[in-house]
């Protein structure tokens, strides 16, 4: 008898580590930020093991980055430092696990062998992941810019600034995940090994 | 491509700071972040700088590593400095040139926030430079233990963290190896346009993921065989030991806070 719980724990741990590694390779962007594949393992775990596993994988990636010192927060006040680390690292990566909402739709499409529907589920799942992460970064951006620009335009600044890298992040992740999950559906189906 | 990747930043050493209990260091940094915001004038920021300098000396870390750690944030520091410089409109004007007006308060706030930023980055850098990620994880597990009451799986999270940390270097090597193997077959992920590069990344990810799942399965089996049953009653291989110096270190923070409160406006 296989203990599934331990196996899931280990898969989450290894994929969080993989997410951390993949966060270091990516395309440099002209405006300075970089587009990495960090979302791919989170979305994969969310599709393979469900929302909770996806959330945990994302959360762990955030914690790993903080523990290894790969994080920055604006020291405007104690609350902002804590809130920024919590939002930009723990929550931002964690919410990507909500891609798992599309897991049933994906599995259904897989059973019907309908590739178009599979792609649609993956893209929609990736969109949820990227959009929620985007919202998290926008919120922390409002906290940060809010200190300087008063009330006006803070939300707009943050929306625009964060979209400059999150749109490519979404496109890249959607492209890679759809190819990956459709070409190698084995990855998302734990029982086929 | 992966040569630049340095994982974790721990530098082995035998300084006073290295020997402190990881829990003490974590608590210290957490409360230090609070204490930093007590400072609000030249004297108090000066005291903070001196205090930080003493800690750097105590940690015996070469300045080079700290400056290296500061590099990625220099842009942020300059950016926040400029924001304060141009957007704070209080006090007498000290520079009025065409459309640029700089106020005394703006300059002051800009300098203060840069000091705060630098001091915080240095302190967190010293934490990660003198403490292994694995002992930070152990310390976090112990410090967060009370959260178990609210059904937060602290032990499981800490276990996964340790496993992740253990496997990050392994996975880095593997990523590098597969990349080179695919490059030898003619795939090129470092040049070409976005679409070409993304197409090249899939042959990297599939073997990487497949072998990662295999690894997870082997690990689970190995744990099963050794009778892993979760947190309750489990003994530790790495032990953290709280000593008098840890208590004293935390006390210096209280002293610092009192001094800062005394000198602030």
Image (spheres, coloured by chain):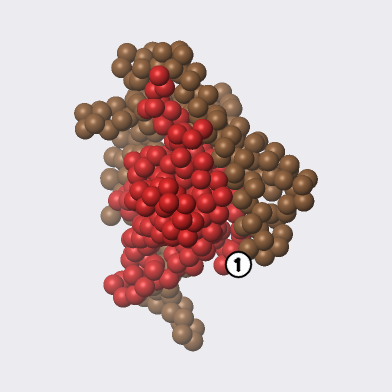
Q: Write down the residue under mark 1.
A: A30
Residue B191: x percent and y percent? Answer: 72, 59
Q: Which chain is brown?
A: B
How many residues crowd mark 1 within 10 Å: few (<14), some (14–19), many (20+)?
A: few
Residue at image position (45%, 13%) is B226
Residue B185 position in % (x across, y down): 77, 47
Locate the C terminus of chain B and report the quarter of the image it occupies: bottom left
Residue situated furthest left in the rendering: B149
B129 displayed left or right of B172? left
Determine the residue located farthest toward the bottom in the rendered image. B98
Above or below B10: residue B75: below
Chain shown in red? A
* In this picture, residue B43 sits left or right of residue B190: left
> Residue B103: x, y in percent?
40, 74
- Residue A178 spot, x, y in % from top left: 51, 55
Is residue B6 among what the camera can see?
no
Residue B171: image quadrant is top right
Q: Is residue A95 above or below residue B171?
A: below
Snapshot quadrant of residue B148: top left
């Amino acid at each position: 008898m296989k203990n599934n719980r331990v196996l899931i724990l280990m898969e989450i741990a290894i994929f969080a580590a993989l997410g951390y590694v993949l966060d270091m390779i990516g395309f440099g962007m002209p405006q300075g930020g970089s587009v990495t594949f960090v979302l791919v393992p989170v979305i994969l775990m969310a599709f393979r093991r469900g929302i909770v596993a996806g959330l945990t994988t994302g959360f762990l990636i955030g914690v790993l980055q903080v523990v290894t010192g790969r994080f920055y927060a604006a020291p405007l006040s104690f609350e902002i430092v804590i809130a920024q680390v919590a939002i930009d690292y723990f929550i931002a990566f964690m919410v990507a696990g909500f891609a798992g909402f599309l897991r049933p739709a994906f599995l259904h499409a897989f059973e019907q062998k309908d590739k178009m529907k599979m792609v649609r589920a993956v893209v929609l799942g990736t969109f949820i992941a990227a959009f929620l992460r985007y919202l998290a970064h926008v919120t922390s951006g409002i906290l940060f810019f809010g200190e300087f620009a008063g009330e006006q335009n803070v939300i707009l600044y943050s929306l625009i600034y964060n979209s400059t890298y999150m749109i490519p992040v979404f496109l890249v992740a959607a492209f890679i995940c759809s190819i990956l999950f459709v070409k190698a559906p084995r990855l998302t189906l734990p029982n086929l090994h | 491509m992966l040569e630049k990747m340095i994982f974790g930043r721990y530098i082995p050493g035998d300084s006073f700071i290295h020997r402190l209990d990881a829990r003490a260091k974590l608590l210290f940094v957490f409360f230090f972040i609070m204490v930093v915001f007590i400072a609000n004038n030249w004297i108090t920021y000066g005291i903070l700088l001196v205090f930080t300098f003493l800690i750097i000396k105590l940690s015996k870390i070469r300045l080079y590593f700290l400056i290296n750690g500061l590099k990625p944030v220099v842009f942020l520091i300059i950016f926040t400095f400029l924001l304060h410089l141009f957007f704070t409109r209080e006090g007498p004007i000290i520079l009025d040139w065409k459309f640029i007006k700089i106020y005394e308060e703006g300059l002051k706030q800009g300098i203060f926030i840069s000091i705060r930023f630098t001091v915080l980055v240095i302190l967190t850098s010293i934490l990660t430079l003198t403490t292994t990620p694995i002992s930070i994880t152990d310390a976090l597990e112990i410090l967060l233990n009370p959260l178990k009451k609210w059904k937060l799986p602290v032990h499981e999270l800490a276990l996964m963290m340790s496993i992740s940390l253990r496997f990050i270097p392994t996975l880095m090597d593997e990523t590098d190896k597969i990349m080179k193997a695919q490059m030898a077959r003619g795939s090129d992920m470092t040049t070409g346009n976005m679409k070409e590069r993304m197409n090249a990344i899939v042959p990297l990810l599939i073997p990487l993921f497949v072998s990662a799942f295999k690894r997870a399965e082997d690990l689970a089996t190995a744990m099963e065989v050794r009778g892993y049953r979760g947190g309750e009653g489990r003994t530790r291989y790495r032990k953290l030991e709280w000593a008098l110096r840890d208590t004293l270190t935390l006390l210096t923070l209280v002293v610092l806070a009192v001094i800062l409160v005394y000198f602030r406006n």
